[in-house]
Amino acid sequence: MFAITNGNVVLRDSIVGKAVIVDRDRIADITDSVPGFIKKVDAGGMYVSPGFIETHMHGRKGYDAMDASFEALNGISAALMPSGVTRFLATTMTMSEDNIKNAVVNAAKSIGKVEGAKLLGLHMEGPFISVEHKGAQPEEYIQKPSMEEFKKLCGGYEDIVRLITIAPETDGAIAFIKEISDKGVDVSMGHTNATYDEAMKGIDAGVVSSTHTYNGMKGLHHREPGALGAVFDSDIFAEMIADGVHVHFAALRTLLKIKGVEKSILITDSLRAAGMDDGVYDLGGQQVTVKGGQAKLKNGTIAGSTITLDRAVYNAMHHLGVTLPEAVRMASYNPAQLLGIDDMGEIKKGNIADIILFDKDINVKGMYISGEKKI
């Protein structure tokens, strides 16, 4: 048992000058006074925050989830910690059936074994997407959604998939969304050419989130609001990449005004190039060139990001006009709520002790995962 003292504790809606007592893997109390027998850890006036949760990231520091090796997931896990991430979903992409199956099976066998940020499961982005808004996903591997095909892709490890991105207008999508939602998998709408009506049918069927909102979807028109209009006109969560590259900050501020902080989730959609120098990298067998931190295919298509979640939180505060607790919420509590995890993502008595310490510029200086010191 220990207590983190002399810190500014970031709660869901406020910041308080209290101590956080940790007992084994749980937060035992948030208090003004600490009993003398409890070991004290001096936070030095830093912010004491819930750890960040990455729900959409492909890779980091030269590794990608599609490498389908324990080394890759373990490398990603370790590389996530300096940016404040304590839990993550590894994200697959549209590739061949064997490539995806290998990545799924590898994740299932690696869960509970990675040494850094803990692996919660997988976000399957594709192959059930639209050709029109495929983005950096290889068109030749796009498929129509079906439970039969999903099971083939999972190789008997369906339970590892926590989130799946689907284009709701594709043949068979509505039936699949209903069936997969009933099995407890969260469905996100993305890489979609859906009209407003098609998107709303998907939401009615079980879609609960929007994948990298604005990017990879039919935009808003006053006579055809499109998928983006459906995001605006519903209560689903909205992912946002706050790097200033994928979406103009003014557009993200508009999204926030409509969705509210409560329904907004910060993601990175990061590649193996994240945390690396500019250069040429691989994404699903495609050449990606990173210049000035911007990743693009040969044809100029944006191919994921190199941002980290700590910088996304910083950008949310400085470019989107949100408070520190609000920015932290979008990177911790909201992702946990999307995934149906009630004891994570918030500094709260009884919750898992995933705790990070950072300075005013969101530079991470300390980390505990399940009460174990990592940084």
Image (cartoon, helix red, strand yellow):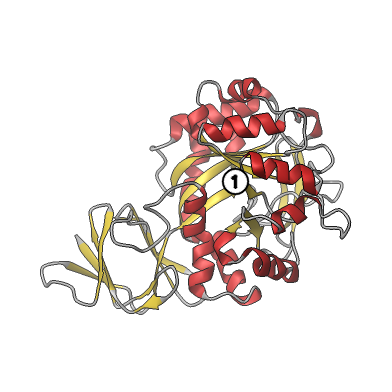
Taking depth in this image into account, of 131 and 103 the one nearest to the observer is 131
Q: Residue at x 66, y 45 (%)?
A: 203
Q: Residue at x 13, y 71 (%)?
A: 35
Is 257 positioned to the left or the right of 50 in the image?
right
State whether residue 356 is above or below residue 104. below
Give x and y (percent) for residue 206: 61, 40
**SS assignment at label 1:** strand
Q: Amino acid at mark 1?
A: Gly
Farthest residue to the right: give it. Answer: 223
Q: Residue at 59% across / 29% down in the picture?
A: 179
Residue 95 shows in this picture: yes
Image quadrant of residue 142?
Answer: top right
Of all residues shown, which one is farthest toward the left?
Answer: 37
Eyeballing the image, is 261 above or below 86? below
Which quarter of the image is occupied by the N terminus?
A: bottom left
Q: Indicate the position of residue 107 as horizontal and vertical percent values.
A: 50, 33
Where residue 197 appears, as percent x and y from the top left, is 78, 45
Q: Is residue 263 left or right of residue 289?
A: left
Of residues 49 and 264, the one nearer the viewer is 264
- The residue pinned by badge 1 equals 59
Rendered location of residue 283, percent (x, y): 70, 41
- Where residue 146 sits, quadrant-wise, is top right
Q: Quadrant of the C terminus?
A: bottom left
Callout count: 1
Query: Is 189 displayed left or right of 79 in the figure?
Result: right
Examine the rendering and report whether any part of residue 191 can be seen.
Answer: no
Mark 1 crowdedness (10 Å alpha carbons): few <14, some 14-19, many ≥20: many
